[in-house]
Amino acid sequence: MVAGLGMKYLEFRSARDTNVLDLDQDQLTTAREILSEHGLAVSSIGSPIGKIFIDEDFEPHLARMRHAAEVARFFEAPYMRIFSFFLREGSDPAAHRDEVLRRMRALADVAEQAGVILLHENEKEIYGDVPGRCLDIMTSVASPNLRLAWDPANFLQVGVRPFSEGYATLRPHIEYVQIKDALLSDGSVVVAGAGDGEVAETVRALRDDGFDGFFSLEPHLGDAQALAVSRDHSCSPRPGKPSPTS
């Protein structure tokens, strides 16, 4: 189905209700064979790295990060999605800044050694949920292997108008764009262009400054498990550097 739509890449998040990082080696090999048979490559590993609370034990999670890097290399995926740790309700993000940055630096070290580029996604309820803290992570860690995945719907869900309030500041660090829209009023996800995500403005600005990275179609609409290999699908909108839309 993905290949039939002309897409050449997909994000690998899960297969048959199992996260990609929890598949055994035989399952990973089978998935790679299936992708190859259909002429598909993996743009990014949709990992849950960084989706633990900031006060939870980090060492087992760091080991999981090392495994995630191995999975990315196995699929020859240039990117891997990560997050910057959930904060307990009511806690002050500033109180956890040093520990967040320590952990993000450790994740970046693994990525540098593996030759994988990490994509920090701005998810609600994590440290890097608003543009200012996303920028703090990028400039403080300052790793060439840590970049940003731009998710306008997630920004709306924390009360931020993406393009108007975050794009100019974060553009130097954006390397992967998720096409997803939502309503500012209640955070509900809607068809791209029908919400407040300023998707058209963002795409025009990216075009005008020569952006040639991946666009990921991540609508979160309908039956997200309709396809067994992954819930996120990618394509290359123009020749040259692979640029999936998911």
Image (cartoon, rainbow, N blue to C red):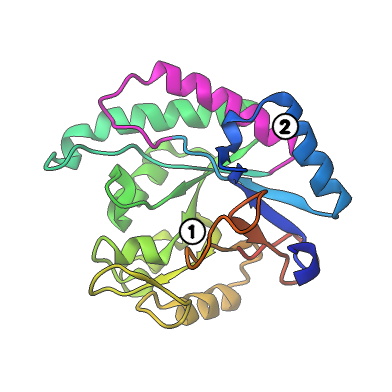
Q: Residue furthest left?
A: 90
Say what secondary structure mark 1 lies in.
helix
Q: Which residue is mark 1?
A: 172
Cβ–Cβ under 8 Å for marks 1 and 2: no
Q: Which residue is mark 2?
A: 27
Which span of residues is magenta-colored? 50-77
Q: Is residue 146 above or below residue 121?
A: above
Q: Is residue 143 above or below residue 210?
A: above
Is residue 52 a member of the stretch shown in magenta?
Answer: yes
Q: Residue at x 71, y 33 (%)?
A: 73
Mark 2 residue type: Gln
Is residue 141 a member of the stretch shown in magenta?
Answer: no
Mark 1 residue type: Pro
- Near mark 1 (Cα within 10 A), the count class, few <14, some 14-19 or many ≥20, is few
Is 178 placed left or right of 227 in the picture?
A: left
Disc 1/disc 2 C-alpha distance (Å): 37 Å
Q: Residue at x 28, y 27 (%)?
A: 99
Q: Tell me if residue 115 can be seen.
A: no
